[in-house]
Amino acid sequence: MGASWQSHVESNWPEVLSRSLCYVCALSGGDLIGFVNVAWDGGSHAFLLDTTVHPDYRRKGIGRELVSRAAMAATEHAIEWIHVDYEPNYREFYQGCGFRPTDAGLMHLGDQRKKK
């Protein structure tokens, strides 16, 4: 999904996904064109991570369908709340998926390491 993430760095996806509640993929002709990961706390909260659709396939409802299917899968695992963090330019997308804005906090741990 390097076309979607300009600063993409290779990571150990099998290890990441092994700790996920589930993940949802969109394929076109065998190519991965969309993805969302559903992480969870082991209880009733889940978190959407890495929602992306290849730039050539955006604005066709694929992202909303991925989020919808991720939410359905989460309910099948008795998840009560699903959270997502997003940048302001994605507000309309996530609100269109049914999320409501909330106050939240974020700490960049890289900043903490630099202080030591």
Image (spheres, rainbow, N blue to C red):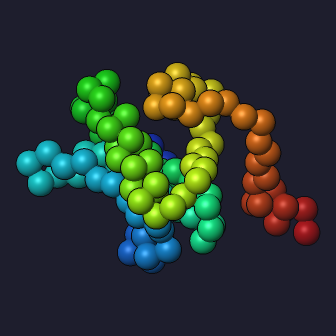
Q: What is the x, y in percent for residue 71?
A: 44, 48
Q: What is the x, y in percent for residue 60?
A: 26, 26
The image quadrant of residue 104 is top right
**In-front residue for pair 73/90:** 73
Is 109 on the left-hand or right-hand side of 61?
Answer: right
Residue visible at 47% across and 50% down in the picture: 50
Q: What is the x, y in percent for residue 10?
A: 42, 64
Can the viewer see residue 8 in this picture?
A: no
Quadrant where the C terminus sits is: bottom right
Can the viewer see residue 34 in this picture?
A: yes
Residue visible at 57% across and 49% down in the picture: 82
Residue visible at 67% across and 30% down in the picture: 101
**In-front residue for pair 113/72:** 72
Is 116 on the left-hand or right-hand side of 22?
Answer: right
**In-front residue for pair 71/23:** 71
Which residue is farthest right?
A: 116
Q: What is the x, y in percent for residue 68?
A: 38, 41
Residue visible at 58% across and 53% down in the picture: 80
